[in-house]
Image (cartoon, grey):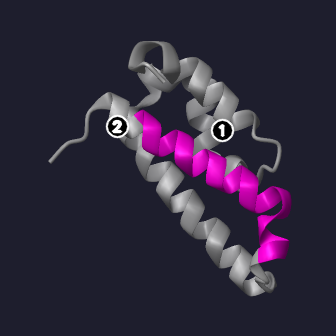
Amino acid sequence: MTSSPRVLAGKLLRALGSAASYNDKGFVWSGHDETRQVAFRSQLQANIAALTEQIGQDALGPELFNALMSGIAAEDASGKFVLLARTRLGAENGL
């Protein structure tokens, strides 16, 4: 069953927000050691990449698409990728 663009956009925004929160202070609060931090970020990136692929480069634009696929968003603590994705996807999806 294929999700609607709005559902996919919402899932991507939540995944990017989770990554930013985790990288800001969440990794400290979680008590994760370095091995668990790497594993958690890897899991975040797998989710971000899967959603990015489903949404597609046309909807995200080449720069954001490539950045999300590269893994940089899974390590970002600033939240800038949430804002970029919301700007790119929000207007057409009511987000």
Looking at the picture, how far across and down is residue 90, in whole percent? 51, 20
Q: Secondary structure at mark 1?
A: helix
> Which secondary structure dominates the residues rendered in magenta?
helix
Q: Residue at x 61, y 19 (%)?
A: 87
Give the residue pinned by disc 2: 7
Of mark 2 and mark 1, the one earlier in the sequence is: 2
- Pair 2/1: label in front: 2
Q: Amino acid at mark 2?
A: Val
Question: Could you tell me how far apart the alpha carbons at marks 2 and 1 are, in whole angstroms?
Answer: 21 Å
Q: Residue 9's image quarter?
A: top left
Would residue 50 be seen by someone viewing this image from the given angle?
yes
* Mark 2 touches mark 1? (CB < 8 Å): no
Looking at the picture, how far across and down is residue 32, in whole percent? 76, 83
Which residues make up the magenta segment? 9-29
Q: Is residue 3 above or below residue 15?
A: above
Looking at the picture, how far across and down is residue 31, in whole percent? 79, 83
Q: Nearer the viewer, residue 5 or 28?
A: 28
10 Å neighbourhood of mark 2: few (<14), some, or many (≥20)?
Answer: few
Looking at the picture, how far across and down is residue 41, in whole percent? 66, 66
Q: Residue at x 48, y 24 (%)?
A: 95
Q: Is residue 16 above or below residue 60?
A: below
Which label was assigned to residue 67? 1
Q: Secondary structure at mark 2?
A: helix
Q: Is residue 51 above or below residue 28?
A: above
- Answer left or right for 78 relative to 35: right
Q: Nearer the viewer, residue 47 or 30?
A: 30
Q: Residue at x 59, y 29 (%)?
A: 85
Q: Amino acid at mark 1?
A: Ala
